[in-house]
Amino acid sequence: MSPNITVIIPLFNEEVMISKLYDRVLKSLSSLDENFEVLCINDGSSDSTEEKLLEIHQKDKRFKILSFSRNFGHQASIWAGLEHAKGKYIGIMDGDLQDPPELFASFHEKLASGYDVVYAVRKKRKENFLKRFAYFLFYRILSKSSHVKIPLDSGDFSMFTSQVRDQMVSLKERNPFIRGIRTWVGFRQLPFIYERDERDAGEVKYTFKKLVKLAFDGFFGFSNAPIRLMGNLGLFIMFGCIAYTIYILIMLFAFDAVPQGFTTMILAIMFFGGVQLFSIRVIGEYVYRIFDESRQRPIYIVKKFYQ
């Protein structure tokens, strides 16, 4: 019999969290519906995460393990969970318990009342100031530049119907940006405000490099703003050059003086060189993503599925 609820939990080197994660998820889902499954995605962990998950799986078969051949990343892990989920309702949460599983009961209640997607919106973050500011800036720039209005301060923590899940996985993207895809498919969506908890134990797995990649996936996957920026910059430079040419002609014919500007010329060359390199970088990002899509490589490889 297919489960009513599937919860997807990506995990990477979370051995210290497994026991507490199991207790809280089990308690919250059992009080909601006994017919559930939990897909624990072991994203190539190098510690004892898989062994601890296997111990749980042996005593509770509802906790299933999808173990990758190597580390493929957080978004790929969620995508794998979506492709293997069988529930009528699908929930997503992080394995560090910053997303409280107890909220799934509230999410489920909203879905039962007619909504298709309930996504969590963080009221307050407890990370350091620099990281909070980076997230704040990222979401607002993305929201303004994207052709899809991705909700501010929303992450992957959510619950939605199997119909939404089916539409999401049908897209077959190589660089999935889950919260963007979830918004793009539409349906009746509802924000749920919550205060995100601090990490209970262990180390933060989203490094600066991984956050930059996530931001790139959001911008280049759901916005043509970088291309528009290049065009606007080109227009600005063109009009600037025209204005400077007019200035030189006025100085030459009205005042019989030619502006001296070896330094200005060098700065102009360096500026234009920088603009060209920046433009090539932006175009290259789009071209690489086209190339990446054309190769059709899988975004993850399953080493073993314990079900």
Image (cartoon, grey):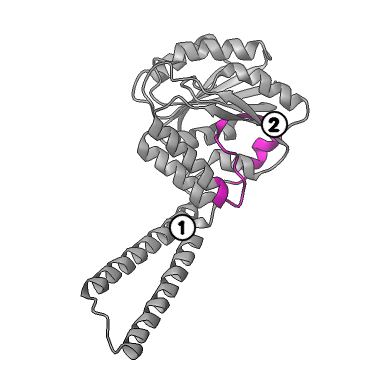
Most distant residue in the front direction:
255
Q: Earlier in the sequence, mark 1 or mark 2?
A: 2
Residue 173 in sight:
no
**Residue drawn at (52%, 33%) of the image:** 78
Is the residue 179 above or below the residue 50 in the image? below
- Label 2, residues with CA under 10 Å away: few <14, some 14-19, many ≥20: many
What is the three-letter code of the residue carrying label 2?
Thr
Q: Residue at x 66, y 18 (%)?
A: 105
70 lies left or right of 290 = left
Amino acid under disc 1: Tyr
Residue labelled with disc 1: 286
x, y percent for residue 237 = 41, 70
Residue 197 vs residue 240, the one in the foreground: 240
Q: Quadrant of the C terminus?
A: top right
Q: Quadrant of residue 120?
A: top right
Compared to 193, does 34 lie above or below? Answer: above
Q: Secondary structure at mark 2?
A: strand
157 is within the stretch colored magenta: yes
How far from the left and from the top, in percent, is residue 266? 24, 71
Residue 243 screen position, x and y as percent: 41, 77
Q: Position of residue 53 (x, y in %)?
A: 46, 16
Query: Can see residue 199?
Result: yes
71 left or right of 103? Answer: left
Q: Give the number of the disc on residue 161.
A: 2
Tell me the distance, in whole angstroms, between the alpha carbons under discs 1 and 2: 32 Å
* Helix, strand or loop at mark 1: helix
Give the magenta part as a residue range: 143-171
